[in-house]
Amino acid sequence: MSIEQTLDRAAASLGAAAGILVCAGAGMGVDSGLPDFRGDEGFWRAYPPLKKLGMSFPEMANPDWFSRDPALAWGFYGHRLHLYRDTIPHAGFGILRDIAPQASRFVFTSNVDGQFQRAGFDPGQICEVHGSIHHLQTHGDSDEGIWSADDVEVAIDRTCFRAVGPLPCSPTGRLARPNILMFGDWGWDDTRSRAQGERLDRWLHELGGGALVIIELGAGTAVPTVRNLSNRLLARRSSTLIRINPRASAGPAGTLMLPMGARDACTALDARLSGG
């Protein structure tokens, strides 16, 4: 099937959808100018000083750094916090928010950048399965819970990507860390993400036998959290999976495969639905 035929079938499915589940991985943000940290070279382009240290993304995205070298840990995560705050979501976000207005929608994402909220999606209809950089928790055992990072500013020496000055702290003065699931992370407080997941389960239950369309964008295979949900839902119920990925769009039988970037695919689908 050609890409044009696949786009036509995908648009027809969206036009008949009762519910749309947007499933997004790191590739969703690439068209907004965000790095996806694909491979060591991609990571080092975003953080050149860490190349000198031989640090890979999995090695750096580890909670142990908040104990071993909190200034380095907050240099990395503080830079990401400000980067995500300053990034404007690309046009594909708005298309996904408004496309097929007859359908209810929910977002399931492994991204921690908060781009869907910034693009105007209902925060109550978003599941951030790996947490959010815009929320903090205490590093180490604590009952202080999760709180907003809206007022947090981290000064960073960009020559070495180390935080300078006071580091973010909890209300009682203990060292804080992002409420993100990191590699080798046994201290992540999943309370917020678990509650979001429960809302997603209720949304799927309330959808009942209605036609479900899953639009998966930029979800890779290295950390297959998003793909696993898409595949599971496709197998479990009568639904349509539209997999958008320029390098790895293959999927189970019945998958509508679009080897395209997220913004271009959303634009093409919108054009078909609007008759453009």
Image (cartoon, rainbow, N blue to C red):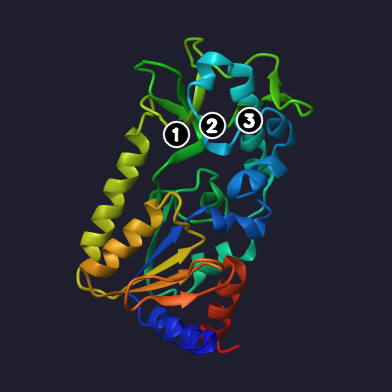
Callout 3: SS: helix
| Local crowd size for mark 1, using a 10 Å CA cut-off: few (<14), some (14–19), many (≥20) | some
| CA separation in Å, label 3 and label 2 | 12 Å
Q: Amino acid at mark 1?
A: Phe
Relative to 238, does residue 153 appear above or below in the rendering?
A: above
Task: Give the number of the disc on residue 59.
Answer: 2
Position in image of residue 255 (x %, y %): 37, 75
Q: Determine the image quadrant of residue 169.
A: top right
Judge depth for marks 2 and 1 and give the one in front.
Answer: 2
Q: Determine the image quadrant of residue 76.
A: top right
Q: Are marks 1 and 3 in contact (CB under 8 Å)?
A: no
Query: Which of the pair 230/18 is nearer the observer?
Result: 230
| CA separation in Å, label 1 and label 3 | 15 Å
Q: Which residue is mark 1?
A: 183
Q: Quadrant of the C terminus?
A: bottom right
Q: Residue at x 31, y 40 (%)?
A: 194
Q: Residue at x 55, y 78 (%)?
A: 270
Relative to 16, does residue 239 appear above or below in the rendering?
A: above
Q: Are marks 3 and 2 in contact (CB under 8 Å)?
A: no
Position in image of residue 240 (x %, y %): 34, 75
Query: Which of the pair 120/127 is nearer the observer?
Result: 127
Q: Amino acid at mark 3?
A: Phe
Q: Is residue 272 visible?
A: yes
- The earlier-in-sequence mark between 1 and 3 is 3
Task: Give the number of the disc on residue 76.
Answer: 3
Q: Determine the image quadrant of residue 69.
A: top right
